[in-house]
Image: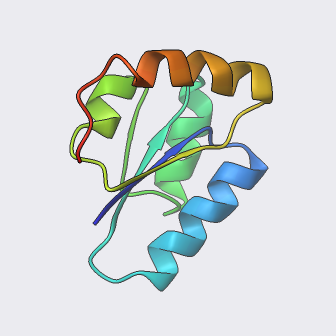
Amino acid sequence: MKFVVVGLGEMGASLALTMKNKLANTEVVGVDRDEESLRLALENGIVDTTTTNLQTAVADADVIVLATPTKVIINYLHQLVKLPLKK
């Protein structure tokens, strides 16, 4: 399974780590605009891979979690409706 977490703040990172630890055979992908957050998440084993590119991250994703402030979630939703998502 491919599990994508957009936003690696406290909530997103906690969820990503929980999913990585609890679900076998799950690839956890972290997406964030902040390169430092991505680096720390990868170094601390919170995610398997990271990217700043939403389209790349959600390709073939089974689950997408938006763990960002509400205003940012709305922006991501507008982007997601334009992308080819797994059905």
Which residue is nearer to you in this view: 55 or 40? Answer: 55
Residue at 78% x, 30% y is 69
Answer with left or right where residue 30 lies relative to residue 40: left
Image spot of residue 76 (x, y percent) = 55, 22
**Depicted 31 relative to depicted 73: above or below:** below
Answer with left or right where residue 44 lies relative to residue 10: left
Image spot of residue 26 (x, y percent) = 32, 70
Residue at 65% x, 21% y is 74
Q: How many marks?
A: 0
**Depicted 74 relative to depicted 50: above or below:** above
Placement of the N terminus among the 4 image quadrants: bottom left
Which residue is nearer to you in this view: 66 or 49? Answer: 66
Task: Name the quadrant containing residue 14.
Answer: bottom right
Task: Name the quadrant containing residue 58.
Answer: top left
Task: Name the quadrant containing residue 23.
Answer: bottom left
Residue at 45% x, 16% y is 79
**Depicted 9 relative to depicted 72: above or below:** below
Coloring basis for residues? rainbow
Image spot of residue 9 (x, y percent) = 72, 43
Answer with left or right where residue 56 lies relative to residue 54: left
Residue at 59% x, 73% y is 18
